[in-house]
Image (cartoon, helix red, strand yellow):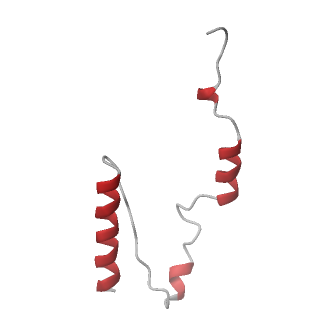
């Protein structure tokens, strides 16, 4: 578990270096613990919903009136 935690710390650091101002939250769960899978729905976006949102034009990018 300590190795996994250290790896996540390095990943978070690299992400913050690559994207200034980024806030990263990670959580490590042991794969062998069945309880790790019981919260899979928490704070995880629905991938189908994200894909649909990407396909839809964003309201902020549409012009309203002559411009």
Q: Quadrant of the N terminus?
A: bottom left
Residue drawn at x 31%, y 46% as measured from the top left: 21
Please tell me whether residue 66 is drawn above or below residue 23 in the rendered image. above
Q: Hey, which residue is sitting farthest top in the picture?
A: 66
**21 displayed left or right of 44:** left
| Residue 48, horizontal then vertical, whole percent | 70, 57
**26 displayed left or right of 35:** left
**24 displayed left or right of 35:** left
Residue drawn at x 70%, y 44% as measured from the top left: 55
Q: Nearer the viewer, residue 54 or 48?
A: 54
Please tell me whether residue 58 is drawn above or below residue 37 in the rendered image. above
| Residue 10, horizontal then vertical, whole percent | 29, 70
| Residue 53, horizontal then vertical, whole percent | 67, 45
Residue drawn at x 52%, y 60% as measured from the top left: 43
Please tell me whether residue 15 is drawn above or below residue 60 in the rendered image. below
Q: Hey, which residue is sitting farthest front in the picture?
A: 18
Residue drawn at x 29%, y 85% as measured from the top left: 2
Which quadrant holds residue 15?
Answer: bottom left
Which quadrant holds residue 47?
Answer: bottom right
How many numbered markers are drawn? 0
Please tell me whether residue 44 is drawn above or below residue 53 in the rendered image. below
Q: Quadrant of the C terminus?
A: top right
């Amino acid at each position: 578990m300590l190795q996994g935690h250290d790896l996540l710390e390095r990943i978070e650091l690299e992400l913050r270096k690559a994207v200034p101002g980024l806030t990263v939250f990670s959580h490590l769960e042991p794969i062998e613990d069945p309880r790790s899978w019981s919260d899979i729905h928490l704070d995880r976006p629905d991938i189908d919903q994200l894909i649909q949102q990407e396909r839809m034009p964003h309201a902020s990018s549409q012009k309203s009136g002559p411009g």
